[in-house]
């Protein structure tokens, strides 16, 4: 599994990548890792944790279930930044949703 977080500005970090080996997915590992990261930055006194994800699909549900809220839409992000078109559930992924957890310290 992998989890990459980058600081964007003072008190604000972005989850750049989170992934679990395909054969180990849907066993709760990703949820535990995401919760651990959320709590890590909460305990460190951060203001917010952000992530960008597709505008549909299970990843969006995964983040929203753990408290992330949509704050912006990056239209055509996946069209402009990926050479090959990405399809999920037969639909071309075009727009990125920017999500955020505000810690409210
Ligand atoms: C997203 C990811 C990290 C979640 O890890 P995980 O260990 O599978 O997570 P969990 O087992 O805790 O499951 C979280 C939810 O995602 C769902 N899920 C996970 N993999 C799925 C898949 N391939 N298809 C459909 N749903 C899936 C689970 O069913 C679960 O849904 P629920 O909360 O409604 O029960 C993992 O699926 C992954 O590595 N995906 C590929 C990389 C990726 O897309 N990363 C996110 C980039 S935005």
Image (cartoon, rainbow, N blue to C red):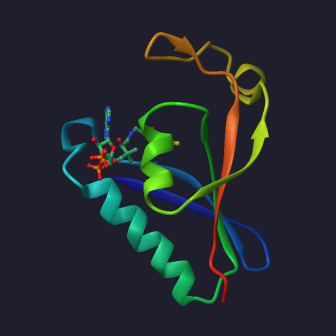
Residue under the point 58% across and 63% down: 5
Depicted 42 relative to depicted 63: above or below: below
64, 16: nearer the viewer: 64
Depicted 19 relative to depicted 22: above or below: below
Instruction: Locate residue 95: give its quadrant.
Output: top right
Instruction: Locate residue 35: give its quadrant.
Output: bottom left
Depicted 6 relative to depicted 48: above or below: above
Image quarter for ligand 1 equals top left
Place of residue 49 in the rendered image (x, y in percent of width and height, measured from the top left) = 63, 67
Residue under the point 33% across and 52% down: 1
Horizontal placement of 22 versus 99: left or right?
left
99, 32: nearer the viewer: 99
Residue under the point 62% across and 79% down: 103
61, 2: nearer the viewer: 61
Place of residue 32 in the rendered image (x, y in percent of width and height, measured from the top left) = 31, 65
Depicted 18 relative to depicted 8: above or below: above
Residue under the point 75% across and 30% down: 77
Image quarter (top left, top right, bottom left or bottom right) of the C terminus: bottom right
Place of residue 66 in the rendered image (x, y in percent of width and height, measured from the top left) = 45, 61
Place of residue 17 in the rendered image (x, y in percent of width and height, measured from the top left) = 53, 50
Instruction: Locate residue 24: give its quadrant.
Output: top left
Horizontal placement of 27 versus 69: left or right?
left
The total of numbered circles placed on residues is 0
């Amino acid at each position: 599994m992998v989890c990459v977080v980058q600081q964007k500005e003072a008190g604000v970090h972005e989850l750049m990548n989170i992934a679990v080996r395909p054969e180990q997915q849907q066993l709760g590992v990703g949820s535990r890792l995401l919760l651990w990261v959320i709590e890590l930055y909460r305990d460190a006194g951060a203001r917010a944790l952000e992530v960008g994800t597709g505008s549909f699909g299970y990843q969006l549900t995964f983040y929203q279930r753990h408290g992330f809220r949509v704050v912006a839409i990056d239209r055509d992000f996946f069209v402009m930044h990926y050479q090959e078109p990405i399809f999920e559930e037969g639909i071309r992924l075009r727009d990125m949703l920017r999500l955020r957890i505000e810690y409210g310290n």
